[in-house]
Image (spheres, rainbow, N blue to C red):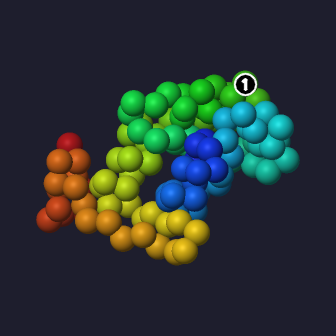
Amino acid sequence: MVDSRGEHAWVQGRAVGAVHMPTGEIAARAPGEIPREVPVVTYCWGPGCNGATRAALEFARLGYHVREMIGGFEYWAREGYPVENDHGPVVRAIDPLTAPVDTITCEC
């Protein structure tokens, strides 16, 4: 996963294991840091931001197999997936408006 947000957003919190690569740096950094055969998933803040779409386009132009994580960091965190910041893990309660709280899947 590639977090395409800026530095301030990255420091505030990110998906555990994500690579920080703001959209404006993808063309210069990606070829040296991410092998082309590795599938890439981009994300930004959330559904109201098109940053992940722009980042996915940059990766596609470079020849990567890429997908966009719909919902972005907002829904990743709200649905209870692992989040960290510079100080370690960030534990958040699952938002019952975005994910079931008593099971692992929404069964959709």
Q: Is residue 6 above or below residue 51?
A: below
Q: Nearer the viewer, residue 84 or 63?
A: 84
Residue at (64%, 54%) from the top-left corner? 19
- Give how far across and how far down residue 85 sits, in percent: 53, 66
Mark 1 surroundings: few (<14), some (14-19) or many (≥20) residues within 10 A: few
Q: Is residue 69 left or right of residue 99?
A: right
- Give how far across and how far down residue 89 sits, in percent: 47, 73
Residue 6 visible in the picture: yes
Q: Is residue 106 above or below residue 104?
A: above
Residue at (85%, 47%) from the top-left corner? 32
**In what element is the residue under mark 1?**
helix
- Give how far across and how far down residue 59 sits, in percent: 69, 33
Q: Is residue 17 left or right of residue 90?
A: right
- Give how far across and how far down residue 14 sits, in percent: 51, 57
- Quarter of the C terminus within the rendering: top left
Q: Residue furthest front?
A: 8
Q: Nearer the viewer, residue 108 or 3?
A: 3
Residue at (55%, 32%) from the top-left corner? 51
Q: Is residue 88 above or below residue 22?
A: below
Per the image, the residue denoted by label 1 is: 61
Q: Is residue 88 left or right of residue 59?
A: left
Residue 2 visible in the picture: no
At label 1, which amino acid type do we have?
Answer: Arg
